Image: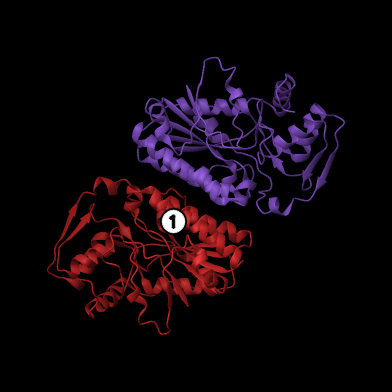
Chain colours: A red, B purple
């Protein structure tokens, strides 16, 4: 097992996360845009979990070319190498629900319109299409999982632009109050990291079907107020919740309510989210309280 | 009126095409990736017709990074400049039917699935999304026209990878025989350049609706055999038609039959194709016979 990580500043890489793995994991500090640096690992891979990329929507709006470089150009270079060094290998790509943009109906299924509201969504969509196109040509064997807000032990609290769950955990662990953008009625279906990992592992080994896109979302649809209240009650009961209008730069790419229709992956792969939000929050909190360097 | 053209080798730029314009047209030899070279033209534009790009599907497969550079990276740089130098300007972008990939049903409407079969389709799709996303944010006022096989006077005969109509015209004007890939039953709806120009002009001036995508296709659905036969009969009656299997590299990204459902632009803008294929072919032929340097 090898991990390739460019350790781009602000993207959340933390080698300590791999220390307690049951078997040693080799870490290669390299950018996927330079696949010649780990050609041997590509050539011998049984499965590739392609999680590389920048996930911050706001940063993509501040510097679109950087986001293009990290999420599209680098992926093209990487997949060109993979498809020639290890033609037809199974690759599972971490996509994002951001490609849909504002939902016309909830929950959102995989065939919903693609109207991304930020550069990150455009660039992640292009990378999805690289995977699927090369897969249909037989040069890869790709599955795309579109993730929604993910949380769990090892949640990156310090990187900017990693989403509101990261911000909420960080503030509450420090005993601070929470600010909610908007009126708190927006829906999300947060997914526990263990459920995401299970989906990736399943997608890595199932023989069929190929070159598919699957949404993976959490088991509950919750408003931001419900999420904030539950987190506050579990982590820092004396913290307060308040509301403020969306900052203009966030409002421009806000997608409103989103929940995932994950029935397709349940039907095809038998996957469904197993961890309720309260249980996942408690596991996350326990991990941070066991001495993680979150402060 | 100014034209910006990078005159990329093999992309068909020909300044002679502008010589008989009713009013002088200023030509700026510049790449849209370097918008600082024509910032004043951007700042004073009433309408921008964004036709820049590489259209060859085969070349995109041979050199995906080049296609990404020309069709996506350059567009991002250009649109970033446009949206700040001339915020909210009407821009009409030349998209392609190639973004759809193989059609599940004919004719193909704008909400059909997006499954491009080549890098060109992925990269043109990303550029479409830039336009529409920035338009929804108010930074542009964009309309995308998705073109199908276009022909007419000034058809580029010498650039590689400009599609089968260019190849057919070139061979027949030289009295050569035609080879058709496949069994000749594939459908296309070739569109006359004058009809395309009318669609662009309309899309450049209509106040509403905004940030829309429209298919524009020709008035007839014809098989490759019908197209080849008509061209042969008009241009070089002694030439023969023969059939051969698709070359492997072309088969990989062949989309099968395609015809455009252009009802949306008819409903919204009142546009429809006016020139039947036979009439368009005769106008094209007349232009070449009037002494164009096609030989």
Q: Is residue B192 shown above or below B95?
A: above
Left or right, B117 with respect to A99, comes to right
Label 1 element class:
helix
Q: Which residue is mark 1?
A: A71
Left or right, A150 with respect to B198, comes to left
Task: State which chain disc 1 sits on.
Answer: A
**Nearer-the-camera pick, B97 or B253:** B253
Residue B247: x and y in percent read 74, 51
Residue B253: x and y in percent read 65, 51
Residue B170: x and y in percent read 74, 33
Residue A233: x and y in percent read 18, 70
Q: Quadrant of the C terminus of chain B?
A: top right
* Residue furthest out toward the front: A37
Tell me if residue A105 can be seen. no
Tell me if residue A264 can be seen. yes
Q: Is residue A110 shown above or below A65?
A: below
Quarter of the rendering containing residue B81: top left
Q: Residue at x 59, y 59 (%)?
A: A134
């Amino acid at each position: 097992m090898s991990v390739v990580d460019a350790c781009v500043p602000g993207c959340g890489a933390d080698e300590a996360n791999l220390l307690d793995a049951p078997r040693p994991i080799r870490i290669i500090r390299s950018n996927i845009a330079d696949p010649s640096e780990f050609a041997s690992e590509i050539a011998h891979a049984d499965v590739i979990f392609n999680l590389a990329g920048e996930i911050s929507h706001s940063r993509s709006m501040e510097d679109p070319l950087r986001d293009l470089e990290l999420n599209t150009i680098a992926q093209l270079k990487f997949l060109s190498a993979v498809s020639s060094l290890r033609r037809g290998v199974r690759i599972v790509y971490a996509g994002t629900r951001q490609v849909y943009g504002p939902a016309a109906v909830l929950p959102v299924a995989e065939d919903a319109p693609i109207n991304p509201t930020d550069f990150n969504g455009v660039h992640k969509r292009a990378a999805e299409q690289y995977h699927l196109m090369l897969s249909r040509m037989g040069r890869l064997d790709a599955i795309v999982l579109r993730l929604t807000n993910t949380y769990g032990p090892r949640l990156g609290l310090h990187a900017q632009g990693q989403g509101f769950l990261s911000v909420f955990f960080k503030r509450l662990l420090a005993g601070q109050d929470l600010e909610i953008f908007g009126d708190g009625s927006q829906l999300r279906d947060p997914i526990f990291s263990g459920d995401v990992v299970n989906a990736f592992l399943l997608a890595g080994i199932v023989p069929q079907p190929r070159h598919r896109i699957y949404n993976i979302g959490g088991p509950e649809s919750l408003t931001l107020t419900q999420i904030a209240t539950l987190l506050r009650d579990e982590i820092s009961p004396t913290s307060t919740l308040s509301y403020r209008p969306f900052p203009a730069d966030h409002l421009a790419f806000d997608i409103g309510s989103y929940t995932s229709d994950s029935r397709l992956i349940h039907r095809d792969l038998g996957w469904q989210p197993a961890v309720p939000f309260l249980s996942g929050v408690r596991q996350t909190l326990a991990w941070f309280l066991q001495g993680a360097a979150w402060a």
